[in-house]
Image (cartoon, rainbow, N blue to C red):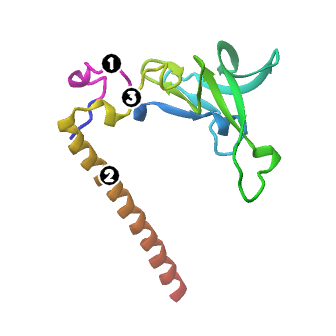
Amino acid sequence: MIVLSRNDKRGAKRKRPRIEELIKISIHNLVTNKPWARTSYVDNAGNKLEFVDEIVRDEQRLTVYINGWPTEMWFLLTEMAIRGRIKNPIPWDSNRIYYVLENGKRYRALYIDPTNKKIGSRDSLRAVYTSESISRTQARFWRDSQKLKKGAMLALRIRCQRGDSHERDSSAIE
């Protein structure tokens, strides 16, 4: 089964973007300055989008910069303490979770829609998961294709691990 994109004339009737087509921005990783978090993205037109957390008038905001210039687009950030009891204490610098507050709801991630050039939460972009957007007859084939992809990736990973071990063994002999 082929999943049709919105640009394909056969899939043009689909109005809502799929989550898989969007670029995900993790708020918590961005605010806590995790080394693996991407803070900037380059769109198809060559514009550099940067997401910077800053405090403006006692509000913590996630501001969008385009090519180094601030824009009018910003998202209100909120933080919550990690609740519950655990055996080992949580360090003081990682005992908070950060969210974007939009329309009275908290979201852990923002998404960039590259085709419509929009930034927002899943609900504001009206994005859906592929499993929610296909018919019942197609759902079975879609699940099977996902299993095949997952199996192929697992087989490739195993093959790479075996290939690395064989190379190490042959270099040890020489």
Judge from the rendering whether residue 21 lies leftward or rightward of residue 96; answer left or right.
Answer: left
In this view, which residue lies farthest toward the top? 72
Determine if the magenta segment contains residue 12: yes
Please say if 123 is above or below 89.
above
Viewer can see residue 174: no
The amino acid marked with disc number 3 is: Val
Q: Which image quadrant is residue 138 in?
A: top left
Q: Residue at x 70, y 27 (%)?
A: 78
Q: Nearer the viewer, residue 62 or 156?
A: 62
Q: Which mark is residue 15?
A: 1
- Image position, residue 131 (x, y; %): 32, 37
Residue 70 lies in magenta, yes or no? no
Q: Give the Cα separation between the discs numbered 1 and 2.
A: 26 Å
Q: Earlier in the sequence, mark 1 or mark 2?
A: 1
Q: How much space separates mark 1 and mark 3, taking CA atoms?
A: 10 Å
Q: Looking at the image, which residue is at 17% across and 37% down?
A: 137
- The amino acid type of the residue labelled 1 equals Lys
Q: Is residue 157 left or right of residue 144?
A: right
Marks counted in the figure total 3
Q: Residues within 10 Å of mark 3 (few under 14, many from 20)?
A: some
- The residue type indicated by label 2 comes to Lys
Q: Marks 3 and 2: which is nearer the front?
A: 3
- Cα distance between the residues tagged 3 and 2: 21 Å
Q: What type of secondary structure mainly makes up the magenta span?
A: loop
For mark 2, what is the residue? Answer: 149
**Residue 29: image location, x then y, percent:** 66, 40
Q: Quadrant of the N terminus?
A: top left
Span of residues in magenta: 5-17
The numbered disc on residue 128 is 3
**Residue found 49% across the figure and 83% down from its top:** 169
